Amino acid sequence: MTHTDTIVALATPSGAGAIAVIRLSGLEAIAIASSVFTSISGKELPKQKTHTVHLGHIKDGERVIDEVLATIFKNPNSYTGEDMVEISCHGSNYIQQEIIQLCLRKGCRMARAGEFTLRAFLNGKMDLSQAEAVADLIASDSAASHQLAIQQMRGGFSSEIKKLREELLNFASLIELELDFAEEDVEFANREEFQKLISKITHVLKRLIDSFATGNVLKNGIPVAIVGEPNVGKSTLLNVLLNEDRAIVSEIAGTTRDTIEDEITIGGISFRFIDTAGIRETTDIIEGLGIQKTFQKIEQAQVVVYLFDAEKFHPEVSGQASKFQVEIETIKNKYPLKNLVIVANKVDKLSEEGIKNLQSAISNLQMLSAKTGQGVEDLQHKFL
């Protein structure tokens, strides 16, 4: 791959739209654009100032392809650090391809995936972490992932590391100077300040390492596994959270055989909800495989929603409450790092006394009715 030639590519998503942007970058970007662009005011693109926009026509010989806006960016003040031109044309697929093919015939080549950002990195316009953040910013679909990407693209922790590196190099040079004067028994570097710097660097690196898991979750969505026995309303809860009939709901126990996943955004944070097969003893091979998958999803999840049927739970029955508590403790002990949310479903079928008895029997209980939507909003706030 050579980085001296001029590249061209569609900068907007492929397909028809109101407008499309075609980007050129390289040594001959402005000259090639000038050869196919005729300004309405008669201006020549190479003679115009950087960061200026010009109205005109793209022509193939005498044939007018489209009326466009051409924006000039002269090096080094451009995204790639090279001469760049962005052509804003009408978003017809035909027009887009005609302009790109015309630029190719004039001496451009098609840009490879990510090549504009690669050139920005090679020309010192951004570091590797900022280059990576460009893709994250484009893919961001929630306020949290967007904020994370924009902070990184603006040099969030790069500047912090750079500053620490400079301090460390300064101390290293002072220690090397001491080695040159070892026989003189002279100290140039303050040992106490050096220890403080080492501790500070260690703390920053640990914080960056710890933040990786958080950043990855915010970028890809927080996985939430909805688990419980068959027919307690897991699929109904998924449907009401997504506000669509995503999972099949049936009175027949064991309807869900495989996991069903979908994403929603709550409070600017993306959550990936996973409906799982009901946990029970079964001789059905297919259902058994689904239950195995349930435990795999619990392993992968950050949050586990344990759902049970409030109508079938009777605290007054001897041993039932204690048996339930044992089941919950077993889950907590098996998955100590998971955030466990215990949810009683179908509370719309309980009396006020029944709800009070349930709340007194189980601590930190979330009450809801997936069928009526009662308590669903409170459950969403529980995730934030």
Image (cartoon, rainbow, N blue to C red):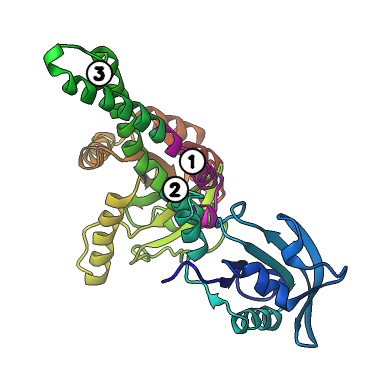
**Which residue is located at x 27 percent, y 19 percent?**
194
- Residue 47: x and y in percent read 75, 62
- Secondary structure of residue under mark 3: helix
**Which residue is located at x 44 percent, y 58 percent?**
235
Q: Is residue 106 above or below residue 187?
A: below
Q: Earlier in the sequence, mark 2 or mark 1?
A: 2
Range of the magenta residues?
136-160
Which label was assigned to residue 195? 3
Residue 353 visible somewhere in the drawing? yes
**Which residue is located at x 46 percent, y 34 percent?**
355
Task: Name the side, left or right, on which 80 lies relative to 179.
Answer: right
The residue identified by callout 1 is 155
Q: Does the magenta portion include 123?
A: no
Q: Residue furthest left?
A: 183
Q: Nearer the viewer, residue 144 or 12?
A: 12
Residue 237 visible somewhere in the drawing? no
